[in-house]
Structure formats: structure tokens, C-alpha cells
Image (spheres, rainbow, N blue to C red):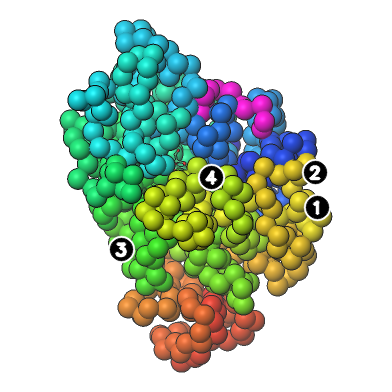
């Protein structure tokens, strides 16, 4: 594909979680042939890039984010030829291919880790982070973010290895030059195989907390303390990211989006300002926009305003409300009962009208909602099971622990894509690896595709609007009513073109008094024909107008 320097600014990216997208062979797990069979559907949305969550060989302790061979496709997803067919199918439709790059850790089944475990002196001995016991225990108090200690004893080598995530995901040692060269070679190989970009997984922890000192964070119920913040955003990490960008990505105009821990505003700048040559944009792992328990419309608005100011001169934004690690956006931020359609459309209106590259997570365009299973055993996600265990350890009853784990569960986003009202929502002819959401008879692509009032049609119109307007893609942003807790009123301006969004981020009617120039309504989730400076907005109402010149 031909790419200009700033091509990533014109993308609308569709995220596919391959396991749950479309199963072509009846084994209950989505696959590449299934994705290929739905490329026309994806293209019909108007998106021009696909981010594929990992499809590499993996024992799947964390659904592919534990890679045992970076250069093979896992047989459950298909073959390398299937990947090539997928890539070509995307390119023929003008869709860029963005692969997930998981290089903070590998699987414990990776041949590097097997060799590293076997010898303290061999070729791979330094590829991972090994430490001797201290007083017969783990080298420090660090917790794995999936529960328990971040150190696992390896009897074969007689040392502990570090895993900030699951014990099946040992952290790579980025201080090892041979490891760096090997990973750089692997990235180059994927570029040579025609990929257009990378979403770089959990990448703020390459350089660890100096001296591997104890984490000062309060202990979790099992006694260990998370060290993610201490290990985040260190100088050595920024240096390696910049080296990858300058030596591998920039020369080939490969786009990159980093999943990083943004603890303060300047972290956005450090990762996503062009002059630093790190990422084109970043997905903050932690920020008010993604904090499940503490978010509010106002904190979200403030975050949008602050990060806009931080990156306006020299950076770019990834815009998303959903991905495979979060509950569904219509359930978390909207209202998946009385106002399902309205709130889904309102959220989309805000995200797609902001400056920055919008990400659509599969099924979001149908307003797919959270799932609730009856037993913890019905959940698959390693993190959900960990939250449940932590809750039981902290004294909650089984029912309370299930409620808490279900509310934050990553499986909410991972239920099979709802294609139709057929068996298993048309996802698979076998038994799906994760239970289908029982609402699929009402919420599915087939039902929404020809309905002009559906959430799906609204997404198509929004994406079409954005792709056709330089002003929406590149224009400036200014907010009115910055301190209003529920109203989002903002304008996009470029030259003498200007759009405005007026939205009510709440489930009750609200009066909106704002400066509204003479304009035409372009899109509305309540069929509104005109707007004025003083008007009542319905619950979750959103209207997009074009200002008359
Ligand atoms: C990222 C991924 C998540 C995974 C974790 C460890 O946050 O998005 O799914 O569990 O990294 O790789």
C-alpha cells in the first residue's frame, strides 16, 4: 500500500479479536478463513485498517498474548498462506493490516525460554530476567498483574524468573543485545511480509525498577505488591522504543500505536509526539478514560481536553472506548437497557468527531453488550479468574466475588461476534469457545445491516462523514461548557469549514445553553432537524451539525 508520512492520521481502525470473530471450520474458535469471509462486511463499514489481535503460535494462557513462535501462525487460526490471503484481501479493499506486537514477554513455551531455563551460560541464558533467591524467597515483593508473585522458581536453572503478567508469560530482558537483535529481525520480517503497522502490547515496562527494589505499593490480598507503575516509562524503555521506530518503522512508513501506562499528562507527550520518534499514537493502559471504577463523563471530557492540549503541536491521539481488555462500551459508559441504541450512537458521535484516529472494536458497531455467566467456571479470562480469587481471599462471598469479577471481566468484550439470529449467532457451527451472549437474536449484524436506524448504519454514516472531511480528520478542537458534568459541546474547525457536536452524556433530559451558529444538522440519534442556542437534549442525545459559512 502507498503511504504518506502522516497516513496514520487518516485511518479508522477496526480491531478484530480473532478467536471470537468468525469460525470457518466448526471448531468453535474464530480463524483467518472466517475473517476473510467477512472482509466485505468490514470494508462496508468504511474503515481503512484492521488491527488483528495475536494470531501467532501460542499455548493461549492469555489468548495469544503469550507467543511461542513469533513467525508462525497458530494452526487454530490457519496457515501462513491464509495470512497472506487475508493480507491481500485487505489490501485489495484499501485496508491496512496492523499486527499485534507482543514483545514485553513471550510464552514460557517459546524455544528461547526453554533454552534459557536449561542453562545459565548458553546462548539464550540472558534472554529473560533471572535472579537468585533472597533468604530462600523471591528476590522482591513484586506482584504479577494476574495474581501471586511476579517471580516463578525454575528448578532446572535453580533461579527465579520475572513475569509481570502470568507465569506463562516470562518478561524478556531488553538489556540483552542478542535478544534485541533477534526481536528487531522478527519485526523486519513482518514488515517484509507486507504488514502496514503494529499495535505494540504492554510496552512501557522494558526497563525495570532500578535495582529490582521492593515496590512501595500497598500489598494485594495475597501479600504481593504491583510494580507496574515503578517499572513504567523509564528512560531505557523510551530509548528502545525510539530505536525501533527510527531503525525499522520510519524507513518503511509503518504506523505504530503503543499500549502504555500513562500516569501523568507528560507521558502522552513522551510516547506520542512526533519529534521524539516513539509511537504515532498511544493507547493508555491506565487513564481516566479507561478507569473502569472511577470514570465519569466529566473526567473523560477533561482528559480529552488536557491530552489534546498536550499533543496538539506535535502529536496524535488514539480514540477508543472499547477493546478486548474492557467491558463493552454501551454497558460501561452508556445504558444497554432503555437507551441502548441512543447511548451507543452518542458515544460513537463523540469518538468519531474528535481529532485522533478512531478505533472500533468488533461488535461495538452493533452495540454488543456485556455478558453475565452464572458461574466463574463459565469465564475463560485469566484476569477475571484472578479478580475472583483475590475477592475470595479478601473475604467476599462467592456471589459477591462473582459480581465484582463479572463487572470488570475482559470476557465481556470477548463473546463471539453476533452475525445473525441463527444458532450460535452465526459465529460457529460447533460449540463456541466462550458462551454467546443470549441477546444475539435481537442484536446481530444481519438485523442491523439494512435498517437505516440501526447502530450499524450510524457507524457507517459517521465513518463515511469522517473519511470525507479533512476538517474532521485534521481540524482543530475547541470545547464549550468545559465544566458541565454531562454535556459535550465541541467544534472542529479547518479553514472556513466547521462542524459542531452537541451531546448529552447522561440518561436524563438536560437543558443545553451554548453558542450555536447557523448550521445544518448532519447526523442525529433522535431525528432532530434543527438546533438552537437554548434547547433541551433527550437522554444520550447527540447531534452533529455543519456550520453554515
Ligand atoms: C495487554 C493486552 C492484554 C494482555 C496483556 C499481556 O494489555 O491487551 O490482553 O493480557 O497485555 O500481554
Query: What is the x, y in percent for residue 524?
Result: 60, 77
Judge from the rendering whether residue 180 lies leftward or rightward of residue 66; answer left or right. left
Query: Marks 4 and 3: in contact by CB < 8 Å?
Result: no
Q: In the image, which is nearer the foreground, mark 2 or mark 3? A: 2
Q: CA separation, marks 1 and 3?
A: 46 Å
Residue at x-position 66% and y-position 26%: 75
Compare marks 4 and 2 and give the one earlier in the sequence. Answer: 4
Compare marks 1 and 4 and give the one earlier in the sequence. Answer: 4
Where is residue 422, by image quadrant?
bottom right
Compare marks 3 and 4 and give the one earlier in the sequence. Answer: 3
Residue ID for mark 3: 306
Query: Marks 2 and 4: in contact by CB < 8 Å?
Result: no
Disc number for residue 429: 2
Q: In the image, which is nearer the foreground, mark 1 or mark 4? A: 4
Q: Is residue 116 above or below residue 252?
A: above
Query: What is the x, y in percent for residue 318?
Result: 44, 53
Query: Marks 2 and 1: in contact by CB < 8 Å?
Result: yes
Q: CA separation, marks 1 and 2?
A: 8 Å
Residue ID for mark 4: 381
Q: CA separation, marks 2 and 3?
A: 48 Å
Where disc 3 sits, the SS reads: helix
Where disc 2 sits, the SS reads: loop
How many neighbours does mark 3 have within 10 angstroms: few (below 14), some (14-19), or many (20 or more)? few
Amino acid at each position: 500500500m502507498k503511504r504518506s508520512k502522516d497516513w496514520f492520521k487518516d485511518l479508522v481502525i477496526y480491531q478484530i479479536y480473532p478467536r471470537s470473530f468468525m469460525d470457518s471450520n466448526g471448531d468453535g474458535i474464530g480463524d483467518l478463513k472466517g475473517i476473510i469471509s467477512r472482509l466485505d462486511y468490514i470494508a462496508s463499514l468504511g474503515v481503512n485498517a484492521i488491527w488483528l489481535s495475536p494470531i501467532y503460535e501460542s499455548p493461549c494462557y492469555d489468548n495469544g498474548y503469550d507467543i511461542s513462535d513469533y513467525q508462525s501462525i497458530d494452526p487454530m487460526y490457519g496457515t501462513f498462506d491464509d495470512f497472506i490471503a487475508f493480507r491481500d484481501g485487505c489490501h485489495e479493499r484499501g485496508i491496512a493490516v496492523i499486527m499485534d506486537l507482543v514483545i514485553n514477554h513471550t510464552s514460557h513455551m517459546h524455544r528461547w525460554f526453554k533454552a534459557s531455563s536449561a542453562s545459565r551460560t548458553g546462548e539464550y541464558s540472558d534472554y529473560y530476567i533471572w535472579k537468585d533467591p533472597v533468604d530462600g524467597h523471591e528476590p522482591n515483593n513484586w506482584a504479577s498483574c494476574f495474581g501471586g508473585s511476579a517471580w516463578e522458581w525454575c528448578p532446572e536453572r535453580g533461579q527465579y524468573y520475572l513475569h509481570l503478567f502470568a507465569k506463562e508469560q516470562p518478561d524478556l530482558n531488553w538489556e540483552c543485545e542478542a535478544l534485541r537483535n533477534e526481536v528487531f529481525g522478527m519485526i523486519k520480517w513482518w514488515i517484509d511480509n507486507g504488514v502496514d503497522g503494529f499495535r505494540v502490547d504492554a510496552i512501557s515496562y522494558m526497563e525495570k525498577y532500578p535495582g529490582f527494589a521492593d515496590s512501595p505499593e500497598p500489598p494485594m490480598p495475597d501479600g504481593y505488591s504491583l510494580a507496574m507503575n515503578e517499572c513504567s516509562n523509564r528512560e531505557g524503555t523510551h530509548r528502545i522504543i525510539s530505536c525501533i521506530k527510527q531503525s525499522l518503522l520510519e524507513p518503511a512508513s509503518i504506523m505504530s500505536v503503543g499500549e502504555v501506562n500513562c500516569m501523568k499528562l507528560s507521558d502522552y507527550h513522551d510516547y506520542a509526539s512526533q519529534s521524539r520518534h516513539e509511537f504515532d499514537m498511544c493507547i493508555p493502559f491506565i487513564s481516566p478514560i479507561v478507569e473502569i471504577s472511577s470514570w465519569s463523563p466529566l473526567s473523560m471530557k477533561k482528559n480529552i481536553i488536557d491530552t489534546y492540549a498536550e499533543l496538539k503541536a506535535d502529536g496524535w491521539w488514539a480514540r477508543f472506548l472499547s477493546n478486548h481488555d474492557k467491558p463493552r462500551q454501551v454497558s460501561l459508559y452508556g445504558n444497554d437497557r432503555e437507551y441502548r441504541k441512543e447511548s451507543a450512537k452518542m458515544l460513537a458521535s463523540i469518538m468519531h468527531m474528535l481529532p485522533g484516529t478512531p478505533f472500533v472494536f468488533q461488535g461495538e458497531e452493533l452495540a454488543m453488550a456485556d455478558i453475565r455467566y452464572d458461574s466463574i467456571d463459565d469465564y475463560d479470562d485469566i484476569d477475571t479468574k484472578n479478580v475472583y480469587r483475590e475477592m475470595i481471599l479478601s473475604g467476599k462471598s462467592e456471589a459477591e466475588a462473582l459480581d465484582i469479577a463479572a463487572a470488570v471481566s475482559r470476557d465481556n468484550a470477548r463473546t463471539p461476534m453476533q452475525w445473525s439470529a441463527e444458532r450460535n449467532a452465526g459465529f460457529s457451527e460447533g460449540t463456541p469457545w466462550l458462551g454467546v451472549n443470549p441477546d444475539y437474536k435481537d442484536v446481530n449484524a444481519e438485523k442491523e445491516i439494512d435498517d437505516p436506524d440501526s447502530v450499524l448504519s450510524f457507524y457507517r454514516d459517521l465513518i463515511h462523514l469522517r473519511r470525507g472531511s479533512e476538517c474532521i480528520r485534521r481540524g482543530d478542537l475547541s470545547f464549550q461548557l468545559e465544566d458541565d458534568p454531562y454535556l459535550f459541546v465541541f467544534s472542529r474547525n479547518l479553514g472556513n469549514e466547521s462542524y459542531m457536536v452537541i451531546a448529552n452524556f447522561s440518561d436524563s433530559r438536560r437543558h443545553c445553553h451554548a453558542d450555536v451558529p447557523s448550521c445544518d444538522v448532519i447526523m442525529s440519534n433522535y431525528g432532530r432537524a434543527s438546533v438552537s442556542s437554548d434547547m433541551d437534549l433527550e437522554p444520550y442525545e447527540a447531534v452533529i451539525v455543519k456550520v453554515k459559512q
